[in-house]
Amino acid sequence: MTIIQTIILGIIEGITEFVPISSTFHLIFSAKILGIAENEFIKLFEVFIQSGAILAVVFVFGKRAIRDVDLLKKTFVAFLPTAVLGVILYKTIKNTFFESDYLMAGVFIFVGFLFLIFEWTAKKHNHKTEKGIEGLTYPQAFLIGILQALSFLPGFSRAGAIILSMVILGYKRADSAYFSFVLAVPTMLGAGFFDFIKTYSSFGISPDQYLQLSAGFIVSFIFAALTIKWFISYLQKHTLNIFGIYRIIAGTLIVLSLLILR
C-alpha cells in the first residue's frame, strides 16, 4: 500500500464513519478498487484509522458530552448489548459477514430502501420528530444498543441504525446523530481494541507500516471532524433521503461490477 492509497482510505474513513452510508463497506470496496491486496495489516489499518475518527468526536463534542452525566450513563447502557453481542459473534462476523461481497452490497442497498420507505411513510403520516436527546430513556438506550448491533453486517452502518431507530422513536434527526457520535466512542474503541489484540499478535509491523497507520489516523481525524459539523447542520433541515438514494445507486453499481468482472 502506497502513501497515496493510505491518504485516500483515511479520507474515505473520515467522511463515511459518521454518516449513514457504512464506512466499513466503503473501505472494503475502495481497497478493492485501488488494487490493495487484503491481508492482516490492511485489516488492522482499517480498524486503526477509525480511532482517528473517534478522536474527532472527542475534539468536537468532548466538553459538551462530559458535562451531561445522565447522557453518559445512557451511552453506557446502549453500549452494553453491542459489546456482548460483538464478543459472542466475533468469529461469525469476521469469517462470514466480511467474506461475501454480494451480502455486503445487498445489505447496503436494502438499508437505502429502508431510509426511503421510512421517510415516505413519515411524511405521509406526519410523523413528529420533536423530542430532544434529554428525553431519551434507559430502556430506549438499551434498545438502540441492540439495534446498533445490526451494524455488524458490513453495509448496514452503525450511524444509520442509531439515527433511524431514534427518528422512528420521535427524536430530532440532529439529536439522533449526536447520540450516534457519542455512542461511537466506546463502541468503536472497544471493537478496535478487541480487533487489535486479535490481529496484532499474529504478525509484526514494519517502520513503513507505522507511518501508514499514522498518516491514515491523522487524515481520518481531519475529515471526520469536518464531516461531523456538516452532518449535524445538514440533518437540521433535511431528511435521510439523499443517503438512501446514494446507497441504492452505489450498491447497484457495485453488484453490476461484480457480475461483469466475475
Image (spheres, helix red, strand yellow):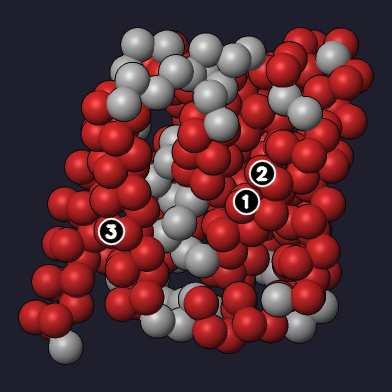
- Quarter of the picture containing the C terminus is bottom left
Q: Name the residue under label 3.
A: 109
Judging depth in this view, the residue of 103 and 226 nearest the camera is 103
Q: In this view, does 232 lie to the left or right of 90?
A: left
Judging depth in this view, the residue of 240 and 208 nearest the camera is 240
Q: What element carries label 3?
A: helix
Classify mark 3: residues with Cα within 10 Å, few (<14), some (14-19) or many (20+).
many
The answer to whether one can see residue 14 in this image is no
> Which amino acid type corresponds to the residue marked 3 in the rendered image?
Ile
The answer to whether one can see residue 193 in this image is yes
In which quarter of the view is residue 87 placed?
bottom right
Judging depth in this view, the residue of 80 and 257 nearest the camera is 80
Cβ atoms at labels 3 and 2 below 8 Å apart = no
In which quarter of the view is residue 186 placed?
top right
Q: Name the residue under label 1.
A: 148
> Which amino acid type corresponds to the residue marked 1 in the rendered image?
Gln
Q: Is residue 163 above or below residue 100?
A: above
Q: Residue at (73%, 15%) from the top-left corner?
A: 134
The label on residue 144 is: 2
Q: In this view, does 188 lie above or below 76?
A: below
